[in-house]
Image: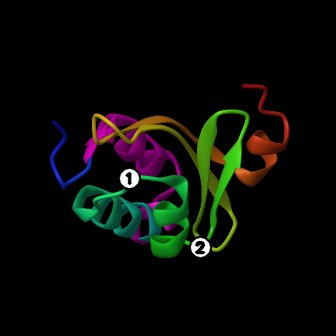
Amino acid sequence: MRTSIVQVLGRKRIDDAIKTNSQWKASLNRWFRIASGAGWKTFAEVRQTLRNADYVKGKVVFNIANNKARLISQIDYEMGTVIVEQVLSHADYDNWKP
């Protein structure tokens, strides 16, 4: 049985991205607060909460900091977990190969 709150795994990846790109701090922290308090059961619910989410090759990708960065995640709706896999600049995301 899954809980109604999503557990976000990979906070270190977010913190590392903030260390490298301090201008992303507010956006990444906002994303973390929203995701941690969500009760997502489907991708449609993710999109209702964060309209900038896209489903790309089995991953959920969020635009961060006004489209300057991408947070790539894997969401397990049954388990109620979001795994932050990478936080990339827009330019690095363009070269990303899942």
Residue 62: image location, x then y, percent:
59, 57
Q: Which residue is found at the position 78% from the left and 26% from the top? A: 97
Left-right relation of 93 to 21: right
Near-viewer residue (79 or 66): 79
Residue hosting label 1: 41
Q: What label does residue 79 carry, if any? A: none
- The type of residue carrying mark 2 is Arg
Mark toward the start of the polypeptide (1 vs 2): 1
Q: Which residue lies furthest to the top in this view?
A: 98
Quadrant occupied by the N terminus: top left
Q: Mark 1, mark 2: which one is toward the viewer? A: 1
CA neighbours of label 2 inside 10 A, class few (<14), some (14 to 19), many (20+): few
Q: Does the magenta stretch include residue 19?
A: yes
Dominant secondary-structure state across the stretch colored magenta: helix
Specify start and end residues of the magenta stretch as a single range. Answer: 7-26
Q: How far apart are marks 1 and 2 (CA)?
A: 16 Å
Give residue 5's quadrant in the image: bottom left
Q: Which residue is found at the position 15% from the left and 47% from the top? A: 3
Q: Residue furthest front?
A: 1
Residue hosting label 2: 51
Quadrant occupied by the C terminus: top right
Residue 61: image location, x then y, percent:
62, 49
Q: Which residue is found at the position 19% from the left and 40% from the top? A: 2
Residue 26: image location, x then y, percent:
40, 71
Left-right relation of 75 to 86: left
Left-right relation of 65 to 76: right
- The type of residue carrying mark 1 is Lys
Q: In this view, does 37 lie above or below 42?
A: below
Near-viewer residue (76 or 23): 76
